[in-house]
């Protein structure tokens, strides 16, 4: 996809932000301002929520769901909670609370007055990671990556099944949402999800509209022809869990991501001038490793130490597709929906001949039955928009959405936002 907008009537609307200013005496350079902004954010508080696991690998055993809170509630104002959920691979804090410059989305929203919670599902980040501490349980095709660290020859896979699933994910989100409501006294929670979090938050909002005030999906993964639920049901698993076949796909609980693959996957979608700051791959990788202490000690040797790998849980998902998205008119009706994605994102829009791997953001927008739905395709942004220049645009759009239920004074429609912040309708 290119970065040029469609040739239709442009709408010139200002960004909901202060005008740009050149540095001058008494006006600190932008980089310094970014650091002071991050330092001024409400301090993070950790909540380790006790949970009885429903994942087959550790079913009925105690587990911990990691949640970080930044409470930016202003004096004499009610707490208005926001829950942010990660995608399939990157831990939540690395995505939503990067400790560099002004890339922390959670800090930005907390400064805007929201009570912001960031969570890791089991198998990710700082939550319980069942079966993931043993090198034996890595995808056999990737075990060569462990030759240097931890070394040796990993044995056959000990737990020859995939790990989590749609039902366990929905239940963990529900546990955290319920906890947040109890802690804050709020009747509903705003939900924000990045990438594959759409698999959890879309169906959750439909199942529990009473708990959800709004839904923001950034770079959402939506398979129009996704895996169906059990016949005759809306949400039941279509097979007996856990799944182990085919073994090359489901016969292990985790795969690995290397720094090299992370960098190359991002690099191919960096096509605009100053789309990404210099050194961002290193900064983001460091944050990922800080949220995966075991993975940080695995992988190729670099200067006598492990470079680290990202341990990625192997899920089995169903129930998110063109049949479920419009159910009961909840999305876009009871639950307003904002969708944002980058025009350079090669992950969220794929070829229709890929079956379960056919993804389409416009198809998601079209499948949402209600009228209160907005979609923005943002120029010069990739799937990793949270760490790119356009992250600041996303922050500001999200703040306006949470406050007013609209962006640029609009509550519905699909639009292209070009490099100069000129808006054009997509249809």
Image (cartoon, rainbow, N blue to C red):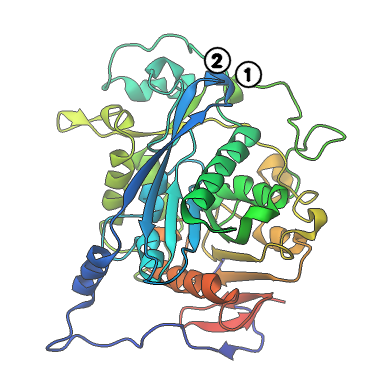
Q: Which residue is disc 1 drawn over?
A: 244
Number of residue marks: 2
Q: Position of residue 408 (x, y in %)?
A: 56, 82
Q: Is residue 395 left or right of residue 349?
A: left
Q: Position of residue 379 (x, y in %)?
A: 50, 72
Return the residue nearer the eye: 352 or 47. Answer: 47
Q: Position of residue 218 (x, y in %)?
A: 54, 59
SS of the residue at dot 2? loop
Task: Give yes or no for contact between labels 2 and 1 (Cβ–Cβ under 8 Å).
Answer: yes
SS of the residue at dot 1? loop
Q: Which residue is disc 2 drawn over?
A: 160
Q: Position of residue 158 (x, y in %)?
A: 48, 11
Looking at the image, which residue is at 73% across and 42% down?
Answer: 226
Q: Quadrant of residue 131?
A: top left
Name the N-terminal-most of marks 2 and 1: 2
Quarter that holds the N terminus: bottom right
Quarter that holds the C terminus: bottom right
CA gap, disc 2 to disc 1? 6 Å
In the displayed orientation, state which residue is furthest to the left. 25
| Mark 1 closeness class: few <14, some 14–19, many ≥20 residues within 10 Å | some
In the displayed orientation, state which residue is furthest to the top. 155
Q: Quadrant of residue 57?
A: top right
In the image, residue 151 sits, relative to residue 100, either above or below, namely above
């Amino acid at each position: 996809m290119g970065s040029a907008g469609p040739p239709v009537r442009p709408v010139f609307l200002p960004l909901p932000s202060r005008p740009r200013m050149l540095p001058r005496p008494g006006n600190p350079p932008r980089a310094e301002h970014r650091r002071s902004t991050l330092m001024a954010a409400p301090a993070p508080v950790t909540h380790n929520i006790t949970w009885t696991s429903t994942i087959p690998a550790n079913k009925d055993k105690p587990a911990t769901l990691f949640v970080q809170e930044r409470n930016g509630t202003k004096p004499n104002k009610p707490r208005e909670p926001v829950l942010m959920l990660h995608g399939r691979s990157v831990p939540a804090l690395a995505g939503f609370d990067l400790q560099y410059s002004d890339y922390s989305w959670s800090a930005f929203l907390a400064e805007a007055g929201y009570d912001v919670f960031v969570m890791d599902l089991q198998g990710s980040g700082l939550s319980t990671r069942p079966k993931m501490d043993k090198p034996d349980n890595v995808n056999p095709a990737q075990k060569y990556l462990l030759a240097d660290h931890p070394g040796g020859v990993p044995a056959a896979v000990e737990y020859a099944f995939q790990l989590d699933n749609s039902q366990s994910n929905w239940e963990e989100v529900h546990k955290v949402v319920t906890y947040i409501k109890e802690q804050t006294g709020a009747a509903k929670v705003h939900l924000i999800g990045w990438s594959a979090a759409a698999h959890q938050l879309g169906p959750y909002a439909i199942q529990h509209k009473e708990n959800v005030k709004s839904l923001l999906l950034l770079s959402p993964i939506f398979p129009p022809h996704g895996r169906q639920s059990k016949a005759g049901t809306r949400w039941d698993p279509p097979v007996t869990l856990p799944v182990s076949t085919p073994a090359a796909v489901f016969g292990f609980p985790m795969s690995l991501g290397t720094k090299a693959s992370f960098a190359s996957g991002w690099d191919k979608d960096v096509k605009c001038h100053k789309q990404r700051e210099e050194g961002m791959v290193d900064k983001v990788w460091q944050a990922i490793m800080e949220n995966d202490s075991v993975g940080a000690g695995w992988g190729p040797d670099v200067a006598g130490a492990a470079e680290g790998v990202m341990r990625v849980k192997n899920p089995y998902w169903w129930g998110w597709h063109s049949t479920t998205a419009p159910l009961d008119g909840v999305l876009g009706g009871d639950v307003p929906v904002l969708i944002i994605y980058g025009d350079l994102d090669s992950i969220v829009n794929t070829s229709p001949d890929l079956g379960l791997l056919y993804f389409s953001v416009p198809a998601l927008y079209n499948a949402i039955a209600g009228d209160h739905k907005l979609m923005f395709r943002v120029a010069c942004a990739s799937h990793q928009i949270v760490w790119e220049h356009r992250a600041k645009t996303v922050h500001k759009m999200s703040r306006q959405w949470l406050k007013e239920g609209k962006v640029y004074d609009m509550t519905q429609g699909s639009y292209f936002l070009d490099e100069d912040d000129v808006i054009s309708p997509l249809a």
